[in-house]
Amino acid sequence: MSRSRSGWPVRLWKGFCYTLGAVVLSVAGVQLWFLGHIVYWNSFNPSSTAFMERRLQAMRVKDGKAQLRRQWVPYDAVSANLKRAVVAAEDARFLDHEGFDWQAIQEAMAKNDRRGKVVAGASTISQQLAKNLFLSGERSWLRKAQEAAITWMMEHVMSKRRILELYLNVAEWGNGVFGAEAAARYHFGVSAAALSPEQAAWLAAILPSPRTYRRGGITGYSLQRAQTIFERMPGAQIP
């Protein structure tokens, strides 16, 4: 009996080690899966994203034949006006950080602390791209940790130019409208290359809640935000 009892700690320790090893291998396998896609998408364009698939599923609940509006265009086929507007609106220090804007994070935390609730975020373009490409819409510390890991990998594999090119082509700009080309044609009837500074500023202004605005649905708030972005655009640095 004593011999049997004395063997329990060893068996428990072995079980713990095997379980821990399995978890580590599983996590490593998942990260390698993400890394493999990032390396691939550094040279090839994604045909879809996790966020696009969720939006299409939601649209098809109401209309079984619903389709997304999207058309991939290379970086040089997007107006510099839109590039500057998006950077000015979403990530002013895009070229200066390595995926995380710690100054913006501190400012957002201080603002949220003063208000007593979450009223400001500090996600960079790289973080937003990581979420759009791979992740679900749930809010959890685990998802944020995975977003951070993907962001770190992207920043070490991809150039800033490629990250911005991907972002401009997968961002949502209306209900089922994805990418700069589809957005420009949907809202203004022009190509992404032909967007004026004013049009670009308005498109950047609606990024936080694009489905709120119908085609060309300019409101007082969107005009005010667009004006602020327009004034910041000359100082926005783009790759």
Image (spheres, helix red, strand yellow):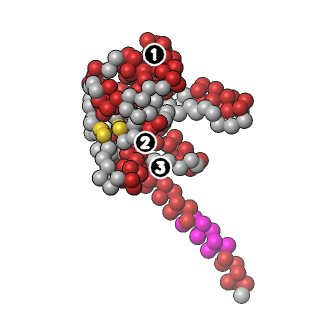
| Residue toward you, 175 or 45 | 175
User: Disc 2 on helix, strand or loop?
Assistant: helix
Alpha-carbon distance for marks 2 and 1? Answer: 25 Å
Marks 1, 3: nearer the viewer:
1
Mark 2, residue position: 132
**Quick check: is 10 in the magenta stretch?**
yes
Q: Are marks 1 and 3 in contact (CB under 8 Å)?
A: no
| Mark 3–mark 2 CB contact (< 8 Å) | no
Would you call the spot at circle 2 few (<14 residues within 10 Å), some (14-19), or many (20 or more)? many
User: Farthest residue in the bottom direction?
Assistant: 1
Residue 147 location (% of width, % of height): 50, 43
Q: Which residues are magenta?
A: 9-18
Q: Residue at x 51, y 17 (%)?
A: 228
Residue type, mark 3 in image: Ser
| Residue marked by disc 1 | 230
- Give the CA separation, mark 3 to mark 2: 8 Å
Give left or right: position of 175 versus 123: left
Give amino acid for label 2: Asn
